[in-house]
Amino acid sequence: MRIAAGLQRHGALSTTPVGVLAQRAVARSKDYLDAHATDDVSSADLEDVAGLNRYELARQFRRLLGTSPHRYLVMRRLDRARREMAGGASLAESAAASGFSDQAHFTRHFKKTYGMTPGHWMALSRVA
C-alpha cells in the first residue's frame, strides 16, 4: 500500500494552474507547427513564436497538449502523409510532401506510431 501511495503521489498531475501567458504561448506554437508542418522547424523558431525558452515551452506544451512539440510536429506530418497516400501518392511522394527527410525516416516514424509499415497500411486501406 505504501508503494502504491508513493507512486500515486509522485505520478499525480501538477495542481499548479497553467498561466494564461503559457497557454497563449503554447497555442501560438501549436498554430505555427500546424502551419509549418512540412518545413524544418527549429527550437529557435518556436522560441521566437512562443516567447518562451525551449525548455519552458516543452514543459508547458507537454503539460497542456500531452506531448512534446517535436512529437506533435511528427504527428502532423504523419497525418498529411496518410492523406497523401489515400489520395494515390507513392510512399516516396508522400514522405517528401509531408516534410520527412527521406522515405526511411518516414517509414520509421510511421511504423513506430501505427505499428505497421506505410506499405502495409496502403494495402489494408485499398482492401477496406
Image (cartoon, rainbow, N blue to C red):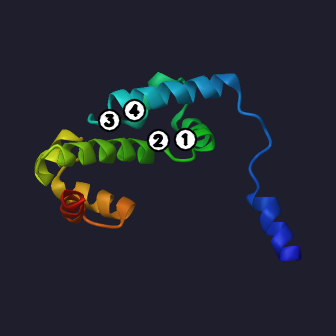
Residue that badge 1 annotates? 58
Cα gap from disc 3 to disc 1, whole angstroms = 17 Å
The tag on residue 37 is: 3
Amino acid bearing label 3: Ala
Asked which secondary structure carries label 1, the reply is: helix
Q: Residue 33 carries which label?
A: 4
Q: Residues within 10 Å of mark 2 (few under 14, many from 20)?
A: many
Residue in the picture at 35% in, 67% down: 115
Give the SS element for disc 2.
helix
User: Distance of mark 1 from mark 4, alpha carbons?
Assistant: 13 Å
Q: Any mark on residue 69, and which?
A: 2
Confirm or deny contact between disc 2 and disc 1 (CB under 8 A).
yes
Camera-near label (3 vs 1) is: 3
Q: Which mark sits nearer the N-terminus, 2 or 4? A: 4
Q: What element carries label 3?
A: loop
Q: Do the residues labelled 2 and 4 touch (CB within 8 Å)?
A: yes
